[in-house]
Amino acid sequence: MDSTAFVQQLLRENDELLARLRPAQTLIAEAGGDLAPKRLLRFALKNEIEATEIAALWIPSAGSTRLKLALARQAGDEARHYRLIEERLGELGDDLAGFDPLASGYSPLFQYLGGLKTDVERVAAGQFTREAIALVKNAQFIELCEKAGDDKTARLYREVIQPDERFHHELGARFLAELAADDGSQALARVARLRTLELAEELQSLAYERQKIHHAPGC
Ligand SMILES: [Fe+2]
Ligand SMILES: [Fe+2]
């Protein structure tokens, strides 16, 4: 299949696959736990620092200068998101004293991404898929913030963070269209994308089981 058609096919499939990340309405109604945006924003910090590190990790071995620069730009964006969220948490009364977003270690998704060796797998998993997941999760989080009356956090996500995450996803789609040029690379991209979705789903259910967390933003 030609690579543009391949990417178009993946984009069409995305809606169906990403729907699995939407918590059922009944689950939302029944869920206990504190879902104040303030609590969920601490989870966002872990996502943002992991996204910063993974993009930076891939720069030295990326196969083209264009990809290196795209990854560097993404690392900078994710680091900026971290700072903005930290600032917002401060305004909400959480000074984050002694908080280490990586205190419980890197997530299984980070470990998987860190082990990917080829650009086509990295772009399929890290930008094209992880950022598509972030777009879905952030849209849910924005809705939650609005319901909770936290318009400022909603605005931060809607106006600043989401446009960046969309840009990262589109960057992923563009590089994928270049790199997934034959059957072999398309197969690698498919596997990396599915594994990323599975790990995101697992993380989401773990967060729910252990801490009654859902609607946490992505990055
Ligand atoms: Fe991102
Ligand atoms: Fe981000």
Image (spheres, rainbow, N blue to C red):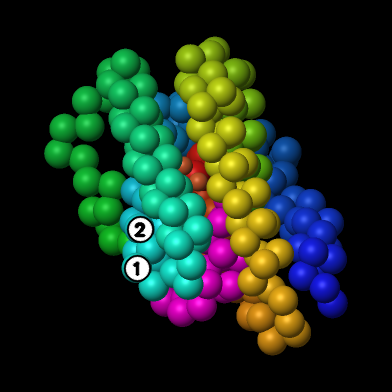
Can you tell which mark lies on residue 125? none
Whether 71 is drawn above or below 5: the answer is above
Which residue range is magenta in the image? 110-131
Q: Residue at x 37, y 43 (%)?
A: 76
Please check the rendered image and state whether residue 174 is part of the magenta-colored stretch, yes or no. Answer: no
Tell me which amino acid carries mark 1: Pro
Front in this rendered view, residue 158 or 167: 167
Q: Is 83 placed left or right of 7 in the picture?
A: left
Can you tell which mark lies on residue 60? 1
Q: Residue at x 59, y 72 (%)?
A: 120
Which secondary structure class fits the magenta region best?
Answer: helix
Residue 145's quadrant in the figure?
Answer: top right
Front in this rendered view, residue 192 or 212: 192
Q: Which residue is mark 2?
A: 56
Residue with the most extreme front position: 65
Q: Residue at x 67, y 57 (%)?
A: 173
Whether 94 is drawn above or below 201: the answer is above
